[in-house]
Amino acid sequence: MNDVAVKLKKKDFATDQEVRWCPGCGDYAILAAVQQTFADIGFEKHKVAIVSGIGCASRFPYYMNTYGFHTVHGRAPAVATGLKIANPDLSVWIVSGDGDALSIGGNHLIHLLRRNIDVNMMLFDNRIYGLTKGQYSPTSEIGKKTKSSPYGSIDRPFDPATLALGAGATFVARSVDVNAPHLKATLKEANSHRGTSFVQIFQNCNIFNDGAFESIREKKLRDDNVIELKHGEPLIYGKDRDRGIRFSNLGQPEIVQLGNGVTEKDLVVHDEAGPIGYTMTLAAMRPPEFPMPLGVLRRISAPTVDAGIHEQVKAVTEKKGAGSLSDIVYTSNSWRVD
């Protein structure tokens, strides 16, 4: 028989489960993009696992014809860490929302990034708690009126990208739910990275926070409100690609109009492995003052803890032998309770 694997298509990654999100939810677009991306990469279904926490995004494993775990609130990074260490050949993808990942799951997230476990995390950011019906979340803007903040939120929001950078993330990127070509390209870049890839996906909740990202989602608006980052290329944007970003003498970003003596040579050239201060400055830019940087903000190489664990186990085993579970259980530091 011919053992050559058959290349799977998008439909092969879909399950027979009814997809149950609110009509118009951005999760539908992300699901379609992920299924197509997995087919394009050439994944085999039994070599992929989707791990989710709690929230609207957490339904994802039910709709992906791969291995999947629907875990508890905020703990998807912990489960994914164990899964990757136990099964190093699996491609592990974490699906989480801004509430799940940045509130109860915040501690797990920062340590996942610090350890640089070789997994991929997709953060669906809609700036609201959707599953519990519209409370403000850790990314909701100041003044946001919700059921839990009827007079406007007074909390300063997290910026997921700068949080990830501060935790030492080796790959940080941003994309948008309905920009399928950009999202698929970003996910492929994340998959190729060795270490934790963190992808923030701006996603619309048309029931509880409709229009939160209109300026970067709508085709007629996004050209003037988005910079698509490309390594080694200047920061240019605009419908006519006639505007760009340069740094002042104090290192502050400023928008300039090309022409009248200002050329592309005056603009900042994007460097994915640039100084962390540069990347932090880039991540902090947002409309209406600045265009939103989308794409890969940072990509650097660093050791992964999962690989380190296996190397350590191998080294100790070669030195001391394989050992046995019974020897561990019945050492002198054990007690029998009758």
Image (cartoon, rainbow, N blue to C red):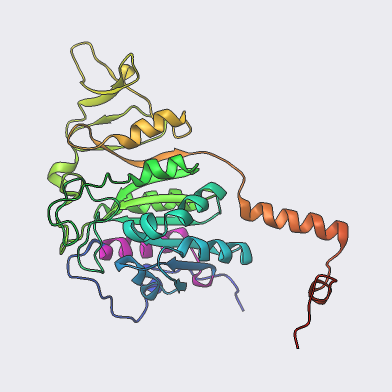
Q: Residue at x 27, y 17 (%)?
A: 263
Q: Quadrant of the C terminus?
A: bottom right
Rendered-image quadrant of the N terminus? bottom right
- Place of residue 193 in the rendered image (x, y in percent of width and height, measured from the top left): 51, 48
Q: Nearer the viewer, residue 199 or 32?
A: 199
* Nearer the observer, 328 or 258: 328
Q: Position of residue 146 (x, y in %)?
A: 16, 58
Asked whether 79 or 51 is in front, the reply is: 79
Q: Which residues are magenta?
A: 27-46
Left or right: 30, with 213 as reference point: right
Give percent across and percent down for residue 269.
37, 25
Residue for point 34% across, 81% down: 16
Q: Is residue 30 visible?
A: yes
Residue drawn at point x = 25 percent, y = 26 percent:
244
Question: Which of the 4 image quadrants contains residue 98?
Answer: bottom left
Q: Is residue 287 magenta?
A: no
Name, please, the residue furthest toward the top: 261
Please state if 114 lies on the left or on the right of 212 as rendered: right
Snapshot quadrant of residue 290: top left
Asked if the magenta segment contains residue 42, the reply would be yes
Residue 290 vertical position relative to residue 306 in the rendered view, above or below: above
Which secondary structure class fits the magenta region best?
helix
